[in-house]
Image (cartoon, rainbow, N blue to C red):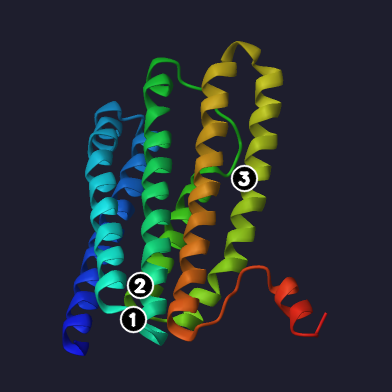
Amino acid sequence: MAVHLQREISKLKQQLLSLCAMVEGQVEKAVRAVQMRDDELAQEVEDRDEDIDLREIEVEEECLKTLALYQPVAGDLRMIVSTLKINHDLERIGDMAVNIARKVRGLVIDPPPDVACDLGSMCEKTQVLLRDSIDALVNSDAAQAASITARDDEIDRMKADVRIALENAIRKNPEKVGPLLRLIAVSRNLERIADLASSIAEDVVYMVEGRIMRHPTLLMARNGHG
């Protein structure tokens, strides 16, 4: 039975990593579509979304089947529970990529004015954060995963700065409110991708070490350190 369980877990890992690659590709294409105002590339992202949804369902069904058949414990149980959570977060990241891609059509028809903001840098840092979260998962690297949450705070700050710059641009160019609001929506979706990448990193720490990183102050209080 143990051999069969390890075979199923190995299969699950491969399915999850395949989904990681698909989702990372979706985010990269969505960002490039916005930067280049490439409507065809944006459409590719939308068309691929159903494939990601189907893959997410397959991984979830495989996890539930493995739990029911083998009743894993300890590290094997943590791995499957973490896979369920990461699988869901990856699907949501795919949705965020589609949301970004859907803003491209409007930006092609009605380009925004030039605005001095760090949206390009935010795109880059968000993609790096997602890539590093996936690398931590691939390598079962809890130390790398644990370092990612602090970097998510930087992207939160960048989103706030981008929003302020774009809102100021709206006041100066009220006739361009539509495209500028689309860019604000892009920044909001990037920030959500970074949040979900950070959540994946937290699940990697739990999977590898059994340590829960969410709500650390509540855990400290519960353990008598508050």
**Could you tell me residue 133's position as x and y percent?**
43, 67
At horizontal 19% and vertical 72% (from top left) the residue drawn is: 11
Name the front one of labels 2 and 1: 1
- Identify the image quadrant of residue 82: bottom left
The residue where tag 1 is placed is: 72
Toward the viewer: 206 or 8?
8
The numbered disc on residue 159 is 3
- The answer to the question of whether label 1 and label 3 lie on touching residues, with beta carbons closer than 8 A, is no
Cα–Cα gap, marks 2 and 1:
9 Å
Identify which amino acid the numbered label 1 is placed on.
Answer: Pro
At horizontal 29% and vertical 34% (from top left) the residue drawn is: 46
Name the front one of labels 1 and 3: 1
Identify which amino acid the numbered label 2 is placed on.
Answer: Ile
Residue at the bottom extreme of this rendering: 2
Choose the circle earlier in sequence order: 2 or 3.
Answer: 2
Secondary structure under the numbered disc 3 in the rendered image: helix
Mark 1 closeness class: few <14, some 14–19, many ≥20 residues within 10 Å:
some
Placement of the C terminus among the 4 image quadrants: bottom right
Secondary structure under the numbered disc 2 in the rendered image: helix
Toward the viewer: 65 or 35?
65
The residue where tag 2 is placed is: 80
- The answer to the question of whether label 2 and label 1 lie on touching residues, with beta carbons closer than 8 A, is yes
